[in-house]
Image: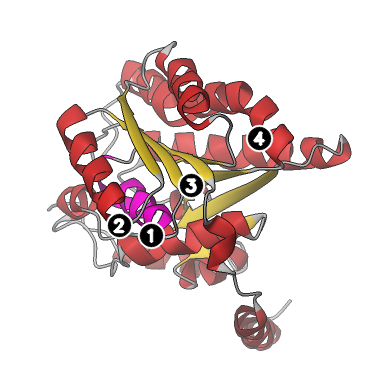
Amino acid sequence: MNTLVKLCLVGGLGAAFLAYQWSEPSLNVESLKGVRVLVTGASKGIGEQMAYHYARFGAHIVITGRTEKALQQVVKKCKELGAKKAEYIPADMSSTTDPFTVVEFALDKLGGLDHLVLNHIGITSFGLWDGDVEHVRWLLQVNFLSYLQMTKKALPALEESKGSIIVVSSMAGKIFTPFVAPYTATKSALNGFYGSLQHELAMQNRNVSITICTLGLIDTESAMRAVKGRTSLIPSPASEAAWQMIKGGALRQSEVFYPWTTYVYTFFRDWFPSQRDKIIRSSYHLEA
């Protein structure tokens, strides 16, 4: 396929995507009133913003994260914003038991579960891989295996409620960029596992939806600190990212892309490989 034909297709498909976006079904936020939700990684960043959105809609919420003091503050604000119930449980997702404990706590406090939001991530450096295999192993437990553990524990309750799983992934799991090799490994694993699980649940007529969320660079404090001086990419707001993921989960969409450019980037990932790699490398700086 020559370059001119590719460019014509790019333009046509871009227009089709915009038309799809404009015709996307709207969400009746009343449907979120009273929903029972567990949000992980909710002591700050995107998870915190998701908790606040759910609270405004009158949801019953359990949140978890590593820092108890921060969780207490988030729960307090959730109640002020209108949450019907807001509880927290500190947890370390590198533990092989805490993921199960968190789901058990949520089921006990909420009496069931409608939305499971898997958002937590482990701390990793933004830089060249230093050969530390043990760190990658640890990160896989936090960013991937703990998601599977929580899914296993929550599935019976979600099947009973015809509920939803919202998996927070990243464009790094679809388009490979420098400085995030361990993180990319975990997000690629999430995409593969939950993409396959979507098919398996549908084939078994188990009425649990899975929404895989592909995010670009988001303006959370930790992300901005990590990439400072390393990239020219423009971040998008965490609050809007949180809302788009909640909406996608409530509408039972199989995928959410935010911002919209992540869809375009991933769709055309393999069309112009040489140009793609040049653009990627020019967007990052070896020296901060």
Q: Which one is in front in this view, the residue at disc 1 or the one at disc 3?
A: 1
Q: Which residues are magenta?
A: 43-56
Dot placed on the residue nearer the N-terminal end, 1 or 2: 1
Residue 234: x and y, percent? Answer: 28, 70
- CB under 8 Å between discs 1 and 2: yes
| Residue carrying label 2 | 81
Q: Observer-nearest residue: 276 or 215? A: 215
Q: For numbered disc 2, what is the local secondary structure?
A: helix
Is 272 rendered above or below residue 238? below
Which residue, given by chain and number where applicable, does mark 1 sit on?
Answer: 56
| Residue 33 visible at all | yes
Closer to the N terminus: mark 4 or mark 2?
2
Q: Is residue 166 left or right of residue 105?
A: right
Q: Position of residue 3 (x, y in %)?
A: 64, 82
Task: Check disc 2 and give the amino acid type.
Answer: Leu
Give the amino acid at mark 4.
Leu
- Rounded to the nearest whole Å, what is the CA distance between mark 4 and mark 2? 26 Å
Residue 47, magenta (yes or no) = yes
Return the x and y of residue 202 as percentages of the image width and height.
82, 42
Q: Quadrant of the N terminus?
A: bottom right
Q: Decide: few, some or many residues near mark 1? Use Cα within 10 Å; few <14, some 14-19, many ≥20.
A: some
Q: Secondary structure at mark 1?
A: helix
Q: Nearer the viewer, residue 287 or 233?
A: 233
Please say if 259 is above or below 35.
below
What type is the residue that disc 3 sits on? Ser
- Tell which of 48 and 274 is nearer to you: 48
Label 4 or label 3, whichever comes before in sequence order: 4
- Give the crowd class for mark 2: few <14, some 14-19, many >=20 residues within 10 Å: some
Disc on res. 169: 3
